[in-house]
Image: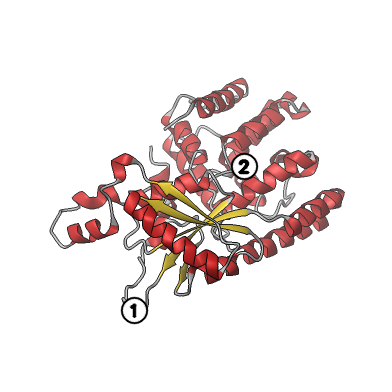
Amino acid sequence: MHNVDDNSRENGIRSILAECNPFQLDLDGVWLERVFAAYRQPHRYFHTLDHLLSICRGIRNNEVWENQSLAAELLLTALFHDAVWVPQGTDSEERSCEAFLYILNAIGNPVPADSVERVRQAILATTLQDDVSELAARFHDFDCQIIIHGSHVDLLDYEFQIFREYQYLNMTEYRRGRSAFFTRFAKRFPECRDTMRFLIDYLEHRRPRVGIYAGTFNPFHIGHLSILEKAERMFDKVIVAVGINPQKNIEPDVMLDKTLPFHEVVDFDTLMVDLIERESVYCDVTLVRGLRNGYDLDYEMNQLCFMQEMRPNTHAVYIPCDKRLEHVSSSALKGLAAFNVSGRDSIYYPTKYNYYWQDVKTVFKL
């Protein structure tokens, strides 16, 4: 669903595209809404409509605007360079090109072949910020304007947004990967060395506020997702921790990684305090628990007493579920699954990130 800010950003982008439209693209067509919808995907925090609008404004306010052909190709590159963006893997740029070519073909190929090829190469060049052409070199400056020209406040905001996008990684992997990126970027662009050193120092000293949302989640349902979303508004990151009770011989929900591809999901068969201690090396950790009623609260308070006696510096927050979801429980859903419900129970299972598993043509279907 659109919000007011997204509508404003989309209108701003559409207005800039209309000012420089030598290819006579139909800017009221469904194809543009499909692209905007991709930038609104809920796993995005930096690669968003706001980032896209910022690039488009940078192009319009630059001297390149006087060259309408070059400006139009830069705007097309901006529009499609993050059409597909997932932090996992290394093929987002290739799939963004696939989306670009698929949409052009669907709307009748209004862009000349030589311009299409230049835009395609520029999109691919964003993988490593390669200057394979004038278009790629110029676009890089617009795409990376925060890193190259941003203030320290801008940089900290940028790094936090990237952290949210990569929350599926554990902290050790994230710190290692970002440090390598900053080092590589500094070598590629020596003028940014001081900026990269600042970000590396920030990375090494910052302790994010992390919630551990723990449960058996067998299965994970829309009530669990509601609690998770509320916790995400409270913490920089939320780890979903799936408890395994060896005495009950209950296997974790094997679909959880598919349901939550953009979150860090961990299994544990230890005491909760041991898990919290393990995750507290680089973070300030708080246990998150969901509550459906007062009975849940009584049980949780007893458990917290045990944990605080074993690990005094243990903190917890308790988040009540929405009233409309009080009846939804894993045990109830397992009971339904024993019958032939013909898929009617599907309404209780999250579909928020289903687009991650869809191919390009499905996501951008016109």
Visible residue check, residue 119: yes
How many C-alpha atoms fall within 10 Å of the one at disc 1: few (<14), some, or many (≥20)?
few
- Which element type, helix, strand or loop, lies under badge 1? loop
Of 37 and 341, nearer the camera is: 341
Horizontal relation, residue 202 to residue 363: left or right? right
- Disc number at residue 315? none
What type is the residue that disc 2 sits on?
Answer: Val
Q: Is residue 105 above or below residue 302?
A: above
Residue beneath disc 2: 119
Q: Write down the quadrant of residue 12 in the picture.
A: top right
Q: Position of residue 13 (x, y in %)?
A: 58, 27
Task: Give the structural element (helix, strand or loop) at label 2.
Answer: helix
Image quadrant for the N terminus?
top left
Residue at the spot x=77%, y=52% of the render? 199
Compared with residue 154, is residue 208 higher up or lower down, i.e. above or below?
below
Drawn side of residue 214 relative to residue 348, left or right: right
Q: Amino acid at mark 1?
A: Gln
Which residue matches tag 1? 247
Q: Nearer the viewer, residue 290 or 141?
A: 290
Q: Quadrant of residue 108?
A: top left
